[in-house]
Image (cartoon, coloured by chain):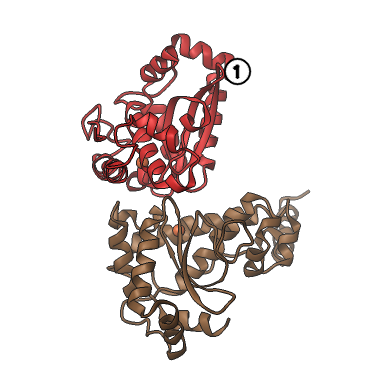
Amino acid sequence: MAHTLPALPYDLDALEPHISRQTLEFHHGKHHNAYVTNLNNLVTGSELENKSLEDTITAVAGDAGKAGVFNNAAQVWNHSFYWQCMKPGGGGQPTGALADKINADFGSYEAFVEQFKAAGATQFGSGWAWLVLENGTLKVTKTGNADLPLAHGQKALLTMDVWEHAYYLDYQNRRPDYITTYLEKLVNWDFVAANLAAA
Amino acid sequence: MARSQLLSLLASLVLLLGWCPLPAWADFALPPLPYASEALEPVIDATTMSIHHDRHHGAYVANLNAQIAANPGLTELSLEALQGQIADFPVAVRNNGGGHWNHSQFWTVMGPVGQGGKPSTQLLKAINASFGSLESLQTEFNKTAAGHFGSGWAWLIRKPDGTLAITSTANQDNPLMNLEGIERGTPLLGLDVWEHAYYLKYQNRRPDYIAAWWDLVNWNEVNRRFAAV
Ligand SMILES: [Fe+2]
Ligand SMILES: [Fe+2]
């Protein structure tokens, strides 16, 4: 069963003016799509062909000889997850059980924001910033290139793409402005809360 | 104190500060582009060049200088010598020192279309010996540059045994660095394949950027680097 590109959960211009239609056209239609195509080309005819995306990732994680499969499979997963982490009119503070958990594990929402901003800004080169659940505790992490919490025994709750292609057309070198906008205007806390509830 | 005395005291202070030698944190400097920011059009647009040089390269220089206080040994090393000892320093020095060297190199190995000359007889001889032909070198270089996953650089290097090779490094690492996993050698030609180098004009089409970039290569500078080994 071939891997497929999921549709964006909103219109291409739904995140304007924070993330432009042009950025999403390339990011979803070209980058994400290329990872899907590359992955299918790499696994077709191999013992990985009929594995689910997550099983494929865990099967090849840490195997240097399968870096191409890992990179493309993980990038397919990361982007599918990233689209759901945003919504038009999102951002601001979470509520309910998620807010309580953030306060309990980070001390305050502001402390979480500080850590998440730092993770995104200091991920040198291409990569991702994450809110994860590890052994029942919330934690902010960052990963390089395609790497992801699934390869580290953590449950992903929220991610932010900090590859330059995610923000360069809209923010150029100003990654911190993209990060601030992501937190204040885009985060879909309902999705994060559902991920926490399901963990 | 009278107002006039105060003003004259302030003026003396300004004068005094102006005479002070530059503080240590100004040790590394952003070199100006060796051509106008629009000189590489249409292959690389002026906006990309000015953001890339002024903002990205500028930030590497500023962040490297910010490391001097915690790493005073930096002031005793040239930028080039630092690369070969990078393993002795924290990762912030590796990232920003590499970023400074790599970009300084990058500006000099490019020039306006049609003004880059061609490989010297000696360089061409070495190219033919290692790759068979210049075309084969370019094919292998393009494959390495396009296939490098994530941010990084593609390089033509002269290895310690005298042969030439193509390699790539992640993020702001380079072939001069004394780090595990790096194929070491003298960089003759390095291409920036961070997305910031081409995204405004080429977006996801990295192979198009690489193919077009060969028209910019300043072979005169590559020849000089080869002869200097
Ligand atoms: Fe991305
Ligand atoms: Fe660059």
| Position of the C terminus of chain B by quadrant | bottom right
Residue ID for mark 1: A107
Residue count near mark 1 (Cα–Cα under 10 Å), binned few <14, some 14–19, many ≥20: few
Amino acid type for the residue under numbered disc 1: Gly
Q: Colour of chain B?
A: brown
- Horizontal side of residue A135 vs A8, given as left or right: right
Q: Position of residue A53 (x, y in %)?
A: 34, 31
Q: In which quadrant of this rendering is ligand 2 seen? A: bottom left
- Horizontal side of residue B72 vs B135, given as left or right: right
- Horizontal side of residue A65 vs B215, given as left or right: right
Residue projecting furthest to the top: A96
The image quadrant that residue B116 belongs to is: bottom left
Q: Which residue is located at x 34 percent, y 76 percent?
A: B112
Q: Is residue A198 visible?
A: yes
Residue B70, relative to residue A159: is it above or below? below
Q: Position of residue A136 (x, y in %)?
A: 55, 16
Q: Position of residue B127 (x, y in %)?
A: 43, 81
Q: Colour of chain A?
A: red
Residue B92, relative to residue A88: is it above or below? below
